[in-house]
Image (cartoon, grey):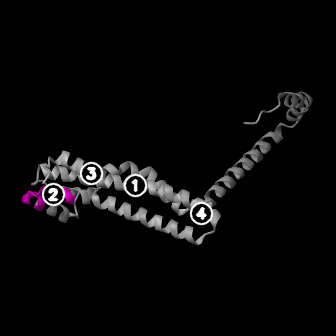
Amino acid sequence: MAKIPIKPVADFAIKHGPKVVDQIAKNPHLIKPAIDKIDKVAQWQNERKEKKEAARTIPYLEQHYKLYNDEILPSLDTCQRSELLSYRLDVQKTLVQISADKAKDAKPKAVLHNKKSKKWEQVLSQIEGKLNTKDYEEYLKLYHNPESESAYFEGYEQNTAIFKKLLTENDSGKIREFLSNQTNMSIEDINRDFFLEFS
């Protein structure tokens, strides 16, 4: 913040202050119109500032990123599998759009596109991580209680049906392979959590 020099302000007040007070005392009828004019000027400046802010639109990708960062990512824990998959597809589509823009623009803009794509790749990795984790948790619940129904897999009942079929076959190798493909978890974690013996 800029420092206001005290001495010139004090000198100005000492020199012109008495004249201003005399004018106000001689012409009290001019005070109200002057205050009204000052209010109108201040109001005009505020309206102008608001119009400038309204005219300055935020680009779609920035709005979209803000939506993901502020609302969607914090609420991933409560999402269904279908929602997580739709978010993942949306972010992948955004990354394809950014790479297409990067290919058609000049080199200096490539740096900006790289920053955008890194931000979106972080969002994608968080969504995919949550998807894999929630899938793993739900399969673990189904493993311990095969009769239960999973609300998380609503719309993806074929996944649970395949998993339950593998459980009835009791083939550790197939269960391990299925879980590894579906959740991207390591074989060691799957063996530990699902108590699978090596076949």
Q: Check whether the beta carbons of the residues at disc 1 and disc 4 lie within 8 A of each other.
A: no
Check disc 1 and report the residue beneath it: 125
Mark 3 — residue? 186
Q: Residues within 10 Å of mark 2 (few under 14, many from 20)?
A: few
**Residue depicted at x 53% and y 58%:** 116
Check disc 2 and report the residue beneath it: 173
Q: Which of marks 3 and 1 is nearer the N terminus?
A: 1
Q: Which amino acid does label 4 sit on?
A: Ala
- Going from N to C along the chain, the mark reached first, 2 or 1, is 1
Marks 2 and 1, Cα distance to the nearest angstrom? Answer: 28 Å
In percent of the image, x 15 and y 63: which residue is there?
162
Q: Which residue is drawn at 37% across and 61% down?
A: 88
Q: Are marks 2 and 4 in contact (CB under 8 Å)?
A: no
Question: Mark 2 or mark 4, which has the lower sequence index?
Answer: 4
Lower sequence index among marks 2 and 3: 2
Would residue 165 be seen by someone viewing this image from the given angle? yes
Label 1 or label 4, whichever comes before in sequence order: 4
Q: Where is residue 119 in the image (x, y as percent from the top left)?
A: 49, 55
Q: Quadrant of the C terminus?
A: bottom left
**Proximity of marks 3 and 1: CB atoms separated by less than 8 Å:** no
Is residue 174 covered in magenta?
A: yes
Q: Which of marks 4 and 3 is in front?
A: 3
The type of residue carrying mark 1 is Ser
Give the camera-side residue of 125 and 8.
Answer: 125
The part of the chain drawn in magenta is 165-178
Report the Cα–Cα distance between label 2 and label 3: 14 Å
Q: Nearer the viewer, residue 110 or 12?
A: 110
Q: Is the magenta stretch mostly helix, strand or loop?
A: helix
Q: Mark 4 points at which residue?
A: 110
10 Å crowding of disc 3: few (<14), some (14-19), many (20+): few
